[in-house]
């Protein structure tokens, strides 16, 4: 009898602990939440983080504070979140570069993109333009390839740095088209686009949201867009796939991630609120105006995207021989 009483008491105690833990998750967030961004203010990742943060603050009743921690190709912010307490109060606005590209570029990383994180929501994505300085003769990818084949190694393409998506996009075009455009790395898109506008380099890849103004003003011309569909703001610009390369599709994505071992109930709560924000008319209009596509995918879909993109970028990096600075 004593044994049965002890078991019953233990069971009740266990239920109490579980209920307490569940109650703690229900009360999440209990304090201000930090969203770390891997890049400086002003870019697409920062826009997504601040848009989500402002609306999550309203719906969840605690401040969601955006902190930009750039450096080391995005690895600094990523490592900080990987090592943070897994209670949902430190989150990462993840860009694909540090999560799926850096594993193929760095011999060793201070975090494991899969084991150290819990995907929450794949928020949005944005394609790139292949841009040319106005005085460069080609007006299409086909014309560019013909000219490049006739003049191997003569023409340059700028990027925002070695190992960046802009760099790897150019190397993928080199591989698929059998041409040799020479890579010129810059410290950020701003420096590279200034030289492209000035005619010091012929070509540059740039995110739609960052580059569309230069195209509409006539400072650069867009030869193609790297996504699976044309950009609605410039529907006359074809995709690279439409230009004869069906395997060429590159999009940068942005998503919310938490440290591994964050309680599932917190992940689910964050995901549910984030999806409401992303699918709201206000947020959708704000992000699509910047050339982004709303995805709002769940943890499983996000994890699958990370897995497939890691394999894709590893192959591109290996074939191109790309290296970090």
Image (cartoon, rainbow, N blue to C red):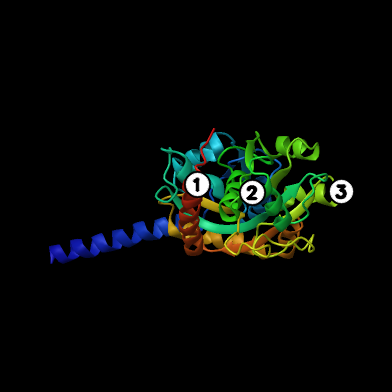
Dot 2 alpha-carbon crowd within 10 angstroms: few under 14, some 14 to 19, many 20 or more: many
As measured in the structure, the alpha-carbon distance from the residue carrying label 2 to the one carrying label 1 is 28 Å
Front residue (pair 90, 234):
234
Q: Position of residue 161 (x, y in %)?
A: 61, 37
Q: Using the rendered view, name the quadrant where residue 159 is placed.
A: top right
Query: Would you name the residue on which mark 2 appears?
Result: 49
Q: Quadrant of the N terminus?
A: bottom left
Front of the two marks 2 and 1: 1
Dot 1 alpha-carbon crowd within 10 angstroms: few under 14, some 14 to 19, many 20 or more: some
Disc 3, SS: loop
Q: Position of residue 134 (x, y in %)?
A: 82, 46
Query: Would you name the residue on which mark 3 appears?
Result: 217
Disc 2, SS: helix
As measured in the structure, the alpha-carbon distance from the residue carrying label 3 to the one carrying label 1 is 34 Å
- Give residue 317's mark: 1
Q: Residue at x 62, y 62 (%)?
A: 245
Residue 154 at least partly seen: yes
* Of callouts 3 and 2, the N-terminal one: 2
* Of callouts 3 and 1, the N-terminal one: 3
Front residue (pair 203, 26):
203
Dot 3 alpha-carbon crowd within 10 angstroms: few under 14, some 14 to 19, many 20 or more: few
Front of the two marks 3 and 2: 3
Residue 89 at least partly seen: no
Front residue (pair 193, 278):
193
Q: Residue at x 68, y 48 (%)?
A: 150
As measured in the structure, the alpha-carbon distance from the residue carrying label 3 to the one carrying label 2 is 28 Å
């Amino acid at each position: 009898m004593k044994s049965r009483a002890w078991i019953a008491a233990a069971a009740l105690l266990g239920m109490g602990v579980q209920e307490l833990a569940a109650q703690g998750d229900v009360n999440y967030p209990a304090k201000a939440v930090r969203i770390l961004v891997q890049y400086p203010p002003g870019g697409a990742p920062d826009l997504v983080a601040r848009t989500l943060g402002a609306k999550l603050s309203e719906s969840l009743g605690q401040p969601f504070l955006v902190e930009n921690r750039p450096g080391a190709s995005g690895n600094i912010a990523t490592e900080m979140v990987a090592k943070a307490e897994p209670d949902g109060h430190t989150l990462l606005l993840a860009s694909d570069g540090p999560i799926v590209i850096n594993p193929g570029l760095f011999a060793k990383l201070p975090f494991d993109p899969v084991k150290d994180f819990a995907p929450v929501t794949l928020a949005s994505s944005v394609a790139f333009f292949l841009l040319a300085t106005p005085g460069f003769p080609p007006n299409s990818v086909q014309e560019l390839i013909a000219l490049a084949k006739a003049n191997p190694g003569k023409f340059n393409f700028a990027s925002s740095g070695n190992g960046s998506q802009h760099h790897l996009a150019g190397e993928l075009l080199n591989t698929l088209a059998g041409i040799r455009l020479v890579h010129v790395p810059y410290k950020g898109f701003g420096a590279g686009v200034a030289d492209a506008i000035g005619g010091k380099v012929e070509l540059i890849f740039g995110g739609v949201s960052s580059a569309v103004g230069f195209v509409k003003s006539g400072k650069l011309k867009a030869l193609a867009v790297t996504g699976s569909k044309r950009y609605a703001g410039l529907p006359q610009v074809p995709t690279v796939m439409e230009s004869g390369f069906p395997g060429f599709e590159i999009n940068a994505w942005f998503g919310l991630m938490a440290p591994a071992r964050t309680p599932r109930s917190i992940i689910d709560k964050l995901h549910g609120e984030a999806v409401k924000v992303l699918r709201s008319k206000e947020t959708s209009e704000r992000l699509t105006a910047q050339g982004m596509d709303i995805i709002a995918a769940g943890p499983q879909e996000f994890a699958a995207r990370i897995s497939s993109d890691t394999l894709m970028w590893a192959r591109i990096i290996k074939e191109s021989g790309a290296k970090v600075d």
